[in-house]
Structure formats: C-alpha cells, structure tokens
Image (cartoon, helix red, strand yellow):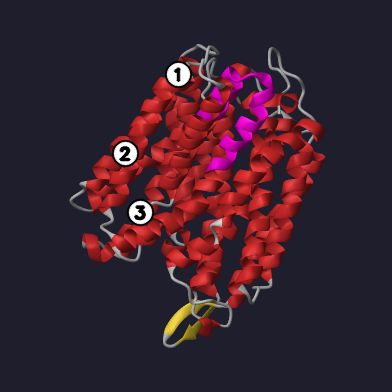
Amino acid sequence: MSRPAVVIGVLASCGLAVSLMQTLVVPLLPQFPRLLGASTSTVTWLVTATLVAGAVCAPVLGRLGDMYGKRRMLLVALGSVTVGSALGAVAPGIEVLLVARVLQGASLGVVALGISIMRDLLPTERVGSGVALMSSSLGIGGAIGLPITGFVAQQTSWRWLFAGAAVLGAVQFLLVRRVVAESPSRSGGRFDLPGALGLSAALVCLLLAISKGSDWGWGSPVVLGLLVAAVVLFVAWGRWELRSSSPLVDLRTTARPAVLWTNLGSILIGFAMFAQFLVTTQVLQAPVESGYGFGLSLVTAGLVLLPIGGAMAVFSPVSARLSARFGPRTTLTAGTVVLIGGNLSMAVLPGSLALVMVAATVTAIGAALSYSALPLLIMDAVPPTETAAANSLNTLMRMLGTSSCSAVVAAVASGLTITVGGVVLPAGTAYTVVFLAAAGAAVGATVISALTPRATPVTAAPSLSAAA
C-alpha cells in the first residue's frame, strides 16, 4: 500500500473537490437567467437538483461500498462528477445543465467512502487524523469555493468552471486508482433495491419541501403534500428495512443510542455551522446604507472569509489529538460550545470586518472540532462491514441540517425586510434571528453530545477513539 500520508492526502483532496461542486454555481445564480434564457425559479433547481441527488446517492453508494468494495464505489462517484462537469461545460441550455448538476451531486458519498477506506487501510495511529481531515474537507471546500468560483466567474466564461471541475475530477479518479488500494472488508448480501427506492422517494419529498418551501409557500398544497408523503414513505421504508434480511440501512444498529443521538446531533450541528457560511457572505455584501452591511463584492467577501478554510484545516488534526486524549465525545461537546460562541458573536452584527472575521473563524473552529469527531463516534458504534453505510447516513443527517438552515434563512430573510434606495433587503433583525437560531441549535447539539452514552463495543471493531 502507498504511504499513509499519501493516501490521506489523496482521499481528503477528493472530499475537497466534491465540496467545491456544491457551491460551483452559487455565484452565478443571479446571472444564469440571462445567460441561459431561463426563469429565476428554474435556475434555482441547479442547487436543488444537486442537493437532492447527493442525499439520494450518498446512502446508496455507502451500502454498495460495504458490499462490493469502497474503492470501487469511490471511483464510480468520481467518474460521475467528472462526466457531469464535462457535460456542464458544453451544456447548450438549462435542461442539460440540470442533468450535469445531478451527476455532480451524486458524488457526495465520496466523503463517507473515504472515511471508511481510511478505517480499513490506515495504521491505527493514523486513522484519527485522517478521518478528521476527511470529515472537515466538506467545510474547507465550502469556505474556499465561493471566492474561487466568484473570481473565475468574473474573469471568464462560466463554462470554464465546469471544465476545470472535469479536469479536477479526472485527476482525482486517476490518483485514487494509482494510490488507494481496495478495502478488504466486505459485508456481502444482496442489494436492497426496494429499500433504496423507498428511501430515495422519501428524501426527494422531504428535501423538495424544505428547499422550495419559501418559494412555493409553506402552507401551499404542494409543500404540505410533499411533507405528508415524506412521513408516509419514511414509515413504510422503515417497516421494510426492519423485515429485510439485507437492508440498505440496518435500523437496529442505527437505533443504538450512541448512533441515534449522534445522528440527531449532526442535524443540529449542520444547521449551526451552515448559518455562518450562508449568512455572513450576505452581510458582507449588503450595502453600507442597510446599517449592518459592508458593501463588498462577492470575491472580496469570499477573501475576507478565506481564513475559515484555513482554521478548519488547522484544527482538524487538533481535533484528532483531543479525541485521542479525551475521547471524541468530549471533542464533539467542545466543538458545539465553540459553535454557540461563534453564532452569538455574529448575532450582534459586528460593526467591523475584523470582528466579523473573528466570529466566522470561531465558528469554523467549532465546526472543525465537531465534524472531525462525528465519524469517530459513528465508527466506534458500528461493525467494520457497515462503516460506509453508517457514515453515509451521518453525512445525510448533516445535509438535512444545512438544508433546514437554508430554508430558515430564506423564510426569515423574506419576512423581515427593509427598503434601501428602492431595493428590498433583509433587515438586520432577520440575520440576528438566524444566528440566534443557529446558536440554539448548537446548544441542543451540546446537550445531546454531553448526555449520549458511550458506544457499546462492536465485534471485530477496534476503538476508533484510541486510533485518533
């Protein structure tokens, strides 16, 4: 096998590349209606389609990885993002571009697969640091993605963003084939196709309702119907999974307190982390006349927040050392406490760029500590043959948190507004409410992490907290 440091570097770079795909089109959303001749509501599907595709494919890829090989499924995911990016670069219209974004979104399972490969292949003493960096790569990529994509979008055609993503995906594909060995751990069994279809349908209904609730109206028949359908489908799916001899998700394992409460806490952590990434950029770009904004361009605002990515990269190995000494549960609790402080600091809408940078960096540190500890807690509580599926489910829980945060931000920002120079903008009160809600989510995550019992040792699974 290649040197552990090389394997960690390659896998973490794959996670970084995939996270960049999530924000690839965000700077271009205001321009796409003109560039593609599409309506604004249609263009927003470029984000929604990626979100839904990632949520559906992550648990499926995780289960297939446990059954047939994690490296094999990692290559499938990287191949999907490469093909999708190449298709996006030559897309003649919005329809083809939507297909490209679906293919890009299908790669979200890369992070969970990479974490599971590390558990299987790395020496025990390198697992913790590798997992910490891989888990934090989603946040690091999100932090550096906006300034990079914003700069490219301003200087050249948007198609070069997709072309560059295709080259990056192809390079990652070749590196994984060259450097990463196949994991020897396999669960076997038959793939649960009805379970995969049921979970996919339930997630599509839920995420469509969450992501489109503000546009369609939270009380509209469509949104309410989607929410009811999601509940019915989840119940039916759960009954099927409990009866299946080879379920897509082992709900009995997932129901263990250490796994169940960690996943619930992950939803709150995703909410608390994403508020900072989503809202702080808007505050920095708001006009000075709003009373809270700084009037920066998208690229400049991204550069101001660039330390977020650096802070997460630095504190990922710190998290691993804390988990090795005190246990991942303690690290997670510390991270959520730091998240509380960062969000409360932004809730007062600091009046200087320096204070905004400090508050955003504090939140990034809390996210790094929390995100790095979550996979260790999950892997301590599940057998090695279920690692990829369990981590994929945890990634999905974090995604539900970030999606819920986006919905809350959209609802509050459209409900509390001011008019500046004839332009309707969110009021400063709206952002204060969002950050207070994020701090409240972090408080809930702190309580959960502090009270969740330690994992019961699983057969043939070494303690991952010691491996850190």
Q: Which mark is nearer the camera, 3 or 2?
A: 2
At label 2, counting other C-alpha atoms closer than 10 Å, the crowd grade (few under 14, some 14-19, many 20 or more) is some
Range shown magenta: 113-137
- Residue placed most toward the observer, 114 or 209: 114
Q: Residue at x 39, y 52 (%)?
A: 47
| Most common secondary structure along the magenta stretch | helix
Q: Secondary structure at mark 1?
A: loop
> Label 2 is placed on what type of residue?
Val
Residue 371 on image: x %, y %: 64, 42
> Label 3 is placed on what type of residue?
Trp
Asked if the residue at tag 2 contacts the one at tag 3, i.e. Cβ–Cβ closer than 8 Å, the answer is no
Give the quadrant of residue 243: top right
At label 3, counting other C-alpha atoms closer than 10 Å, the crowd grade (few under 14, some 14-19, many 20 or more) is some
Q: Which residue is mark 1?
A: 191
323 over 138 or under it: above or below: above
**Residue 131 shown in magenta:** yes
Q: Is residue 225 visible?
A: no
Q: Secondary structure at mark 2?
A: helix
Tell me the number on the disc at residue 45: 3
At label 1, counting other C-alpha atoms closer than 10 Å, the crowd grade (few under 14, some 14-19, many 20 or more) is some
